[in-house]
């Protein structure tokens, strides 16, 4: 038996923190998702940067399609999943590096990274970036939690017999 290694929520409190953030910042998330504060391609690049770290197969599938539809090239998608941002628009790189770092540190980015994000974009873009990151992080970890349950069921780890 192999070990389940994808990221999931460590506690209900962590899940609730993301839900609370999204509810409190609903207007910033809605503006980002509608393309008012960041372009659809920029939004999808952020989403793919976070999803690459969290490795949610459901979000990878859905947002690869959305990224391609928004004008992101297949090569860019592959680079984003590989954690390479050299081919991405220069004006988006700070946000993409921040999104990756945010996911890698499980929502505890270094203050220098946060300052760099704030120095690089206007406040409404910073809010949009944070909203997109938190929205996809919740989706990634929820999808991975579903996979963890499926994994446990397939190995009889939830008390059922596997025949």
Image (cartoon, rainbow, N blue to C red):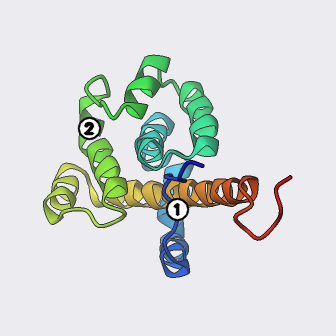
Q: Is disc 2 surrounded by few (<14), some (14 to 19) or many (20+) residues within 10 Å?
A: many
Foreground mark, 2 or 1, reads: 1
Q: Position of residue 20 (x, y in %)?
A: 52, 78
Vertical relation: 31 (above or below) 11: above
Which sits in the foreground, 54 or 22?
54
Residue at the spot 46% in from the left edge and 50% down from the top edge: 54
Residue 1 on image: x %, y % = 60, 49
The residue tagged 1 is 8
Looking at the rendered structure, which numbered label has been put on residue 93?
A: 2
**Is 145 positioned to the left or the right of 104 in the image?**
right
Q: Quadrant of residue 106?
A: bottom left
Residues marked 2 and 1 touching at CB (< 8 Å):
no
Q: Residue at x 63, y 58 (%)?
A: 148
Percent x, y of residue 113 = 18, 56
Q: Earlier in the sequence, mark 2 or mark 1?
A: 1
Name above or below for residue 2 compared with residue 41. below
* Residue at the far left in the pictured view: 112
Q: For residue 125, say whether it is visible.
A: no
Helix or strand or loop: what does disc 1 sit on? loop
């Amino acid at each position: 038996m192999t070990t389940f290694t994808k990221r999931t929520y460590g506690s209900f409190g962590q899940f609730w923190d993301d839900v609370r953030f999204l509810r409190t910042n609903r207007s910033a998330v809605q503006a980002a998702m509608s393309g008012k504060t960041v372009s659809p391609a920029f939004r999808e690049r952020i989403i793919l940067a976070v999803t690459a770290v969290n490795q949610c197969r459901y979000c990878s599938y859905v947002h690869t399609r959305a990224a391609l539809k928004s004008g992101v090239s297949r090569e860019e998608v592959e680079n984003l999943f590989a954690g390479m941002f050299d081919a991405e628009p220069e004006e988006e790189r700070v946000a993409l590096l921040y999104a990756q770092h945010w996911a890698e540190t499980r929502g505890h980015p270094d203050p220098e990274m946060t300052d760099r994000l704030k120095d690089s974009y206007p406040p409404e873009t910073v809010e949009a970036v944070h909203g997109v990151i938190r929205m996809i992080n919740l989706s990634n970890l929820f999808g991975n939690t579903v996979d963890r349950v499926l994994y446990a069921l397939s190995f009889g780890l939830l008390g059922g017999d596997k025949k």
